[in-house]
Amino acid sequence: MKALIIGDVHFDRWIEAERDPFAALTPEDWAGLDALFIAGDLSDKPRVRWKYAIRHLARHVDPGRIHIIPGNHDYYDFQIDRDDRLAEIAAGEGANLAQKAEIKVTDTRFLCCTLWTDFALRGDVPGSQVIARERMNDYRYIRHAKAKYRKVRPYEIVQIHQEHRAWLEDRMSRPHAGQTVLITHHCPHPELISAAPTELDPVYGSDLAAMIAHFQPDAWIFGHTHHRAEAREGATLIKNVSLGYPDEVTPGREGELLRRGLLGVDEDLRQVTAGP
């Protein structure tokens, strides 16, 4: 099994910068790829821009093998409660939306969802929600269709986080003979959110270490933070696979960052091989 997992593609920003990060991958990198997972933030304005991003990726891999987990940016100028429309946009290009989706590739199951955050990382949920609403573009650019298209609110994000977390717990509790890999946009571990703690950390992730320790999936891959870090929680590999904005990536380093999400599984994902 060979899978490539990439977070924070921000394809629209790279096009504006007249750079193609995927040109840095070799034919050998793309060869034999069973699945390409986008761990959130394919682009802003999905109704207009997703199709171009998917078509670009389809130059390298069959679009039927492309699975898109929405990130916060994938809801910009869109609605938080219209995953059905995102699924239609992806399907229109032959790709797949992977929101609360279990995808099996050989004997590996990938459990995919955005996850969002519970804002509880610092123990002050109301305070963290105020900071998020004041400083994060999510609460300016994401709308709620069923609430008369008003701007989304932090408490609604918590509700979605709880729904996604319950879904992950339910799926992990089901027996599976092969490997289990979780892919989310948001970070599940406090030590991997940032190099130095900030008041914005609760926006980017939650402390799910106890959940990881209980279920011990083989790997949990995420994006969102643009902070490339990895660790192990017991037997579980936890790893950020953000590409990031073009102004964050030194020209010539694109291939190195993309290969961070290149997973090759032999007999045991606990002995995962990946790019640098």
Image: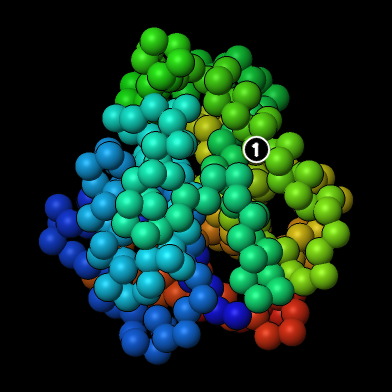
Task: From the viewer's perspective, tell me whether residue 60 is left or right of residue 193.
Answer: left
For the residue marked with disc 1, what is the amino acid? His
Q: x, y (%) of residue 98?
A: 52, 51
What residue appears at the point 34 percent right and 79 percent down from the top-left corner?
25
Is residue 243 shown left or right of residue 215?
A: left
Q: How many marks?
A: 1
Mark 1 secondary-structure assignment: helix
Rendering quarter of residue 254: bottom left
Q: Quadrant of the N terminus?
A: bottom right
At x 32%, y 57%, the residue is 93
- Asked whether residue 160 is in view, the answer is yes
Task: Please state the horizontal and vertical placement of residue 32, each as a whole percent of the image.
Answer: 47, 85
Residue 252 vs residue 5, the one in the foreground = 5
Residue at 71% x, 45% y: name it. 168
Q: In the rendered view, would you say 10 is above or below 81?
A: below
Seen in the image, is 257 located left or right of residue 189?
left
- Residue 54 is situated, as x and y percent measured from the top left of the image, at 31, 59
Looking at the image, which is closer to me, 92 or 242? 92
- Look at mark 1 in the image and give the residue it sits on: 164
The extreme bottom residue here reads 28
Q: Quadrant of residue 118?
A: top right
State whether residue 66 is above or below residue 268.
above
